[in-house]
Amino acid sequence: MSGALTVSIVIVSRHRPDALRRCLMGVSQLAYTPFEVIIVADPASCAGLRSVPTAAHVKLLPFDQANISAARNAGVGLAAGEIIAFIDDDAVPEPTWLDHLAAPFADPTVMAAGGFVRGRNGISWQSRANSVDWTGQETPLDIPESSPTVLTPPTGRAIKTEGTNMALRHSALVALGGFDPSYRFFLDETDLNLRLAAHGWSTALVPLAQVHHGYLESARRRADRVPTDLTEIGASWGVFLTRHCPPDQVASAWARVQTDERARLLRHMVTGALEPRDVGRLMSELISGYENGLKRKSAVPVPLPTTGHPFLLYPGSFKAPNKVFSGRIWALGRLRRKARLAVQTGHRASLFSFSHTALYHRVRFTSDGVWEQTGGLFGRSVRDQKAFRLWTFRRRVDFETERVAKVRSITG
């Protein structure tokens, strides 16, 4: 696959150098051309990337504010592509991500596109197709999962895209004023979705444009996704409801948010991840943050400045074939060495290794650049499969290879 539209990929990172390197490894295996890479990160992470072989082909921008909206806008300021795509540092794209995500922009009426996001096990869905209303309430959408769907929402609703897997036409993003820095890390893309919808602009939902999102530890959550601070979530809700929600619905919308957050915290408490006093503290942070957000002035959108930076072509591996390695679990070490060597010699590599069990499958993109799927020969990969099913080894490898072939760029 290839496309004529130039794409700028913006990656924002803060104090996660290992995740950033892994993300960049995934980006380097994209099948699409032409694209450029813009990394907006803390100074230490930028310095660490300078030793990466492809660093000369990356636009690096040191940025040390804890504000993802401001960081993304800074990245947009360096972008020269007709399309600007966004992915988080703790996410990795499938090799055909940009091919699928950029394709709907061949229609000049499409101003934004969003793909599907897989969760930490590499198989279950974290986010698919949703719309969102001006209270922030999301509603699932039923769309075909083999082709893009272009949607223009009715008044009061928008098509939801996720910040870790979305793209916008450069001209539209500039005209909208980019992301509102009042949202420091939450609801920033939802605010943008509603502003897109207010212009009557169309958004494409693209199921085959897939990324794997890890939800790594941050200043606001632990590695197991348990929140440690809800202040900024509350503040973002204050900004969002003030800007978008009809005044007579604000109280009920805010009550719903508090109910949902409390229910989430109680689920963590039941599992032992939080103590009762933690629930009280976190809810207090949510409320105080909300009150702060009500006072926070939401920026009046004005067109972003354009600086005329030249396009910096990233030397991706769009011509590299994808090699498939498979074997029993006892051969995993040997298979990993072979797959790692394949990546080092310019190929993409997918590795399937199954034990004689019914263990659930997991998919991960390793730091060596290998797509690795492990689990039981008789166990589930897709989570709506039967818990146990008899397979021959070869048939199972063929099934799993076919399952990912369209997004992994596996042929033959």
Image (cartoon, rainbow, N blue to C red):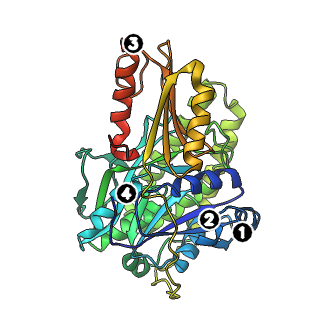
Give the residue pinned by disc 3.
388
Asked whether 386 or 277 is in front, the reply is 386
Q: Where does label 1 land, which residue?
A: 64
Quadrant location of the C terminus in the rendered image: top left
**4 or 2: tag closer to the N-terminus:** 2
Which residue was labeled with disc 4?
114
- Left or right of residue 236: residue 177: left
Closer to viewer: mark 1 or mark 2: 2
**Where is residue 4 drawn, in percent x and y?**
33, 72
Residues at marks 3 and 1, CA–CA distance in whole angstroms: 49 Å
Locate residue 261, reporting x and y percent.
Answer: 54, 42
Q: Identity of the amino acid at label 3?
A: Phe
Identify residue type, mark 2.
Answer: Thr
Q: Residues within 10 Å of mark 2 (few under 14, many from 20)?
A: some
Nearer to us: label 4 or label 2: 2
- Secondary element under disc 4, as helix, strand or loop, is strand
Could you tell me which secondary element the residue under label 3 belongs to? loop
Q: How many marks?
A: 4
Residue lying at 55% horizontally and 42% vertically, measured from the top left: 370
> What residue is disc 2 on?
54
Q: For marks 4 and 2, give the CA distance.
A: 27 Å
